[in-house]
Image (tube, rainbow, N blue to C red):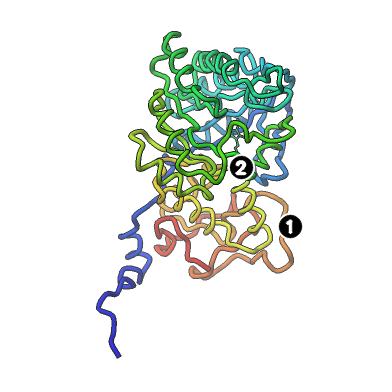
C-alpha cells in the first residue's frame, strides 16, 4: 500500500485556508448591472421570465442607478424601451427619446461616481425588432445600419454616456462609431464592443424584457454557436477598429471563447451573463433544486476565472450587497439570497431561519431585506462562497 506524497487537500481544509489560496474573487467593481427603462410606465413592471428584474420607470431607474453607485458597481448598462417604434428605429436617434433622455437623467443623478454605459443597437427601437434596417430583399442592411449607429453613438455620447456599447454585430460598426465620436468631439468616450456575440437561445427572456418585436432570429449577423476560431477574428477586427473593451456573450456556455478572447486581447474583456442564464438559475432555485446563492456566486466566479475583467449580470446589485455584507463581517441570515417575490416553492423547500452556521442557505425562502444582520461568521467569507450543501 503506498500513500500519496502530494496532498492538495491540505490547502482546502478550512474556510480560512481556502480563502488564502483562492485564485479568483468577486468585487463589486467587476460587476455591471444591465437595466431596462420603459417609456410611459407608471410603475416598475416585473418581467415574468426574469423574476426579480423589472422594466424601470424613468424615476425608478434613478433609484437603481443610485443604488448601483452606492454599492460600488463597475457600471450600469442602459437599455431603453420606447413607446413607439418604426422601421428605422428613429426613437434611438432622438435626443429626447427614452434611452437618450435616461442617459442624461442618470448622469445628472450619479455624475462621475458611476460608469454609465448605453446599449447601441436598433432592435429595441425598430418595429421589426432587428438590430439594423432592412433592405429591399428583406435582409438586414449592414452598411445602411452603420450610418445610423454612427449617429446613435454621437447622440448617446452627447447625452452623457460614459461608454457606448454597440451590440448589433454589424461588420465595421466599431470603426464607424469611433470615427463619428471623434469627429463630434467625443474622443474620450470609449467603445465596449460586443465582439463575439452569438445567436443564442439564452437571450429568450430578454425578448420579454425589451418587448421585442422580432419574428425569427438574428443568425445572419450574430455568430454561430459551433464556431470558435471565428470569434478570434471578430475580436481582432474590433480591436483593430479601436474597441476599448471587447465582450463575449453569452457567458457560461461560451467560457472557451472567453478564455480565447482574454489570451489575445490587450484591452479589458467583458462577459455578459445573459437573461437565459439568469432565468435558469432562478427557475431551478425557485423549485428548490439548487442552492440559489451558491450557484449565483459559482457562476460568476467561473466567468471571472475564465478571464473576464468584468461581468454584466442581472445579479450585480444583489451580489455586491452580499460582498459588502461579508466584508462588514455580517453573515446573511438563512433567508438571504431570496428575493421579495411570492414564495412559490414546493412545500418543504422554504426553510425556517437557521440557527446553525453550518446550515446551508436554502433557496427561495422569504426575502431577508429587513432581517437583522447576524454575527460575524468566518465560514461565510470563503472567497464569496457559502458552504456548499
Ligand atoms: C441586442 C441585445 C440583446 C441582448 C443584449 N443586447 C438581444 C439579442 O441580441 O437578441 C441580450 C441580453 C440578454 O439576453 O440578457 N440589443
Evaluate whether residue 106 shows in this view. yes
At mark 2, the secondary structure is loop
Pick the residue in front: 255 or 65.
255
Q: Is residue 158 left or right of residue 2?
A: right
Residue 200: which numbered mark, if any? 2
Q: Position of residue 214 (x, y in %)?
A: 72, 31
Pick the residue in front: 63 or 290.
290
Alpha-carbon span between mark 1 and mark 2: 29 Å
Q: Is mark 2 within 8 Å of ligand 1?
A: yes
Write the residue at 35% across / 60% down: 19
Q: Is residue 73 left or right of residue 372?
A: left
Contact between marks 1 and 2 (CB within 8 A): the answer is no
Residue 79: which numbered mark, if any? none
Q: In the displayed structure, would residue 20 be above or below residue 154?
A: below
Q: Position of residue 297 (x, y in %)?
A: 49, 54
At mark 1, the secondary structure is loop
Q: Position of residue 172 (x, y in %)?
A: 49, 22
Q: Position of residue 311 (x, y in %)?
A: 47, 41
Q: Which residue is mark 1?
A: 344
Q: In the displayed structure, would residue 144 be above or below residue 235?
A: above
Write the residue at 68% across / 20% down: 134
Pick the residue in front: 196 or 318.
196
Write the residue at 58% across / 34% down: 222
Q: Residue furthest bottom?
A: 1
Q: In the displayed structure, would residue 143 be above or below residue 196?
A: above
User: How many neighbours does mark 1 have within 10 angstroms: few (below 14), some (14-19), or many (20 or more)?
Assistant: few
Quadrant in the picture for the N terminus:
bottom left
Pick the residue in front: 358 or 88.
88
Amino acid at each position: 500500500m503506498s500513500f500519496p506524497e502530494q496532498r492538495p487537500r491540505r490547502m482546502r481544509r478550512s474556510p480560512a485556508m481556502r480563502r488564502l489560496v483562492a485564485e479568483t474573487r468577486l468585487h463589486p467593481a467587476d460587476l455591471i448591472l444591465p437595466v431596462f427603462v420603459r417609456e410611459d410606465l407608471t410603475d416598475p413592471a416585473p418581467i415574468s421570465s426574469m423574476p426579480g428584474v423589472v422594466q424601470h420607470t424613468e424615476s425608478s431607474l434613478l433609484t437603481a442607478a443610485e443604488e448601483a453607485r452606492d454599492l460600488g458597481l463597475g457600471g450600469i448598462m442602459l437599455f431603453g424601451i420606447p413607446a413607439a417604434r418604426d422601421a428605422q428605429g428613429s426613437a434611438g436617434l432622438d435626443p429626447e427619446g427614452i434611452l437618450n433622455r435616461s442617459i442624461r437623467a442618470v448622469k445628472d443623478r450619479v455624475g462621475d461616481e458611476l460608469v454609465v454605459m448605453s446599449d447601441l443597437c436598433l432592435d429595441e427601437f425598430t418595429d421589426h425588432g432587428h438590430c439594423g434596417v432592412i433592405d429591399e430583399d428583406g435582409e438586414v442592411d449592414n452598411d445602411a445600419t452603420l450610418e445610423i449607429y454612427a449617429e446613435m453613438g454621437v447622440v448617446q455620447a452627447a447625452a452623457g454616456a460614459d461608454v457606448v456599447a454597440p451590440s448589433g454585430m454589424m461588420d465595421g460598426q466599431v470603426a464607424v462609431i469611433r470615427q463619428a465620436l471623434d469627429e463630434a468631439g467625443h474622443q474620450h468616450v470609449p467603445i465596449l464592443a460586443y465582439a463575439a456575440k452569438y445567436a443564442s437561445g439564452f437571450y429568450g427572456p430578454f425578448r420579454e424584457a425589451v418587448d421585442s418585436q422580432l419574428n425569427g432570429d438574428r443568425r445572419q449577423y450574430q455568430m454561430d454557436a459551433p464556431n470558435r476560431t471565428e470569434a478570434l477574428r471578430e475580436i481582432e477586427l474590433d480591436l483593430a477598429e479601436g474597441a476599448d473593451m471587447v465582450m463575449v456573450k453569452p457567458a457560461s456556455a461560451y467560457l472557451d471563447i472567453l478564455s480565447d478572447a482574454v489570451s489575445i486581447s490587450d484591452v479589458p474583456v467583458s462577459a455578459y451573463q445573459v437573461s437565459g442564464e439568469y432565468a435558469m438559475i432562478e427557475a431551478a432555485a425557485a423549485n428548490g433544486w439548487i442552492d440559489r446563492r451558491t450557484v449565483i456566486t459559482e457562476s460568476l466566479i467561473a466567468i471571472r476565472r475564465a478571464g473576464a475583467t468584468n461581468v454584466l449580470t442581472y445579479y450585480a446589485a444583489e451580489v455586491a450587497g452580499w460582498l459588502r455584507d461579508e466584508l462588514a463581517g455580517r453573515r446573511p441570515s438563512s433567508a438571504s439570497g431570496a428575493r421579495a417575490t411570492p414564495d412559490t416553492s414546493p412545500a418543504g423547500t422554504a426553510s425556517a431561519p437557521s440557527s446553525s452556521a453550518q446550515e446551508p442557505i436554502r433557496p427561495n425562502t422569504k426575502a431577508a431585506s429587513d432581517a437583522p444582520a447576524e454575527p460575524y461568521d468566518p465560514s461565510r467569507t470563503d472567497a464569496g462562497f457559502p458552504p456548499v450543501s
